[in-house]
Image (tube, rainbow, N blue to C red):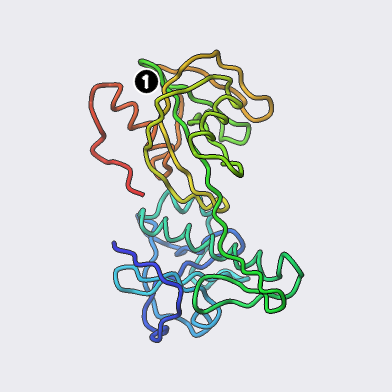
């Protein structure tokens, strides 16, 4: 599936299209999807053509994002995270894009400088204040992820909000004036009290909870003993690569990052199914 992003509304808006419809924070999906959860192109209702946000073309068909108050007929709603675990990767990524555009639109209807109602711009994806000229673009919050390793072991941790038994790599948001490399060193030191070296870029993933860009690295342990950060880290420990606790699923970059390192440590090389942003 090939996606071409765009923001200007197409002239043939009534043609069959992909619709990413949200009721609040939840995605509308078919009530009876069959064995595989999926979304299908369908004719575009007039209200979507006027109120929806255009996303671009997926395999030559238009994509729209829309927030509604009631569940559409023949549909039910699912939390976005659960839906992303079941949808095809291309559709999951577009659902994430859609919810971020809707969240930006919802939270920037008034100017943050003077309070005047903003106006949606047709030349770019932005909302502009007609009074003072302040322009608001969709917000992206960069965050680093670091999988710390030493020979035969991975440092994994769990935060209090994780599901029971789940462990993952370390992560945190980039601060103003900070590089990604500086963020990795700071967050690892703050969260578990160790030092790292030899950072290696792994990949990135848009993470719509609510508007993050996860940038993943591996980092070699350089010293220090694990001291979990109070209130941020519930537990952290070194785990042999062949005796890991529960880790995130493959739809997240954390799941691919950890599995890729396990494959390397086991001598199997890279996994057959590599991470594809």
User: Residue 21 appears at what percent x and percent y?
Assistant: 51, 68
Residue in the picture at 66% in, 64% down: 107
Quadrant of the image occupied by residue 153: top left
Quick one: SS at disc 1?
loop
* Along the line of sight, the residue nearer the viewer: 87 or 174: 174
> In this picture, is 188 found above or below 239?
below
Quarter of the image that includes the N terminus = bottom left
Foreground: 93 or 224? 224
Q: Residues within 10 Å of mark 1 (few under 14, many from 20)?
A: many
Residue 39 placed where, x, y %? 39, 64
Q: Could you say which is closer to the camera, residue 150 or residue 41?
A: 150
Is 95 located above or below residue 15 in the figure? above
Residue at the image position 61 percent from the left and 21 percent from the top? 228
Q: In the figure, 20 relative to 12: above or below? A: above
Which residue is found at the position 47% from the left and 82% from the top?
45
Instruction: From the image, tell me which residue sits under label 1.
Output: 241
């Amino acid at each position: 599936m090939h996606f071409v992003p765009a923001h200007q509304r197409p002239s043939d808006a009534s043609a069959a299209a992909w619709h990413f419809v949200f009721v609040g924070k939840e995605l509308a999906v078919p009530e009876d999807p069959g064995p595989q959860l999926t979304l299908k192109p369908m004719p575009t209702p007039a209200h979507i053509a006027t109120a929806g946000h255009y996303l671009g073309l997926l395999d030559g068909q238009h994509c729209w994002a829309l927030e509604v108050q009631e569940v559409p007929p023949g549909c039910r709603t699912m939390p976005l995270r659960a839906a992303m675990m079941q949808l095809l990767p291309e559709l999951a990524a577009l659902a994430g894009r859609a919810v971020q555009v809707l969240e930006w639109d919802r939270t920037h209807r008034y100017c943050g400088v003077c309070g005047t109602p903003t106006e949606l711009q047709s030349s770019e994806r932005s909302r502009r204040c007609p009074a003072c000229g302040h322009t608001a673009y969709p917000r992206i919050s960069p965050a680093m992820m670091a999988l710390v390793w030493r020979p035969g072991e991975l440092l994994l941790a769990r935060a209090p909000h994780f599901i029971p038994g789940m462990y993952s790599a370390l992560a945190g948001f980039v601060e103003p004036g900070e590089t990604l490399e500086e963020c990795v060193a700071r967050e690892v030191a703050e969260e578990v009290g160790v030092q790292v070296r030899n950072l290696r870029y792994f990949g990135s993933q848009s993470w719509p909870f609510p508007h993050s860009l996860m940038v993943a690295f591996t980092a070699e342990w350089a010293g220090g003993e694990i001291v979990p950060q109070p209130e941020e880290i519930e537990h952290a420990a070194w785990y042999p690569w062949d005796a890991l606790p529960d880790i995130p699923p493959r739809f997240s970059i954390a799941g691919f990052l950890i599995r890729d390192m396990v494959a390397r440590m086991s001598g199997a090389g890279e996994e057959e199914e590599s991470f594809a942003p």
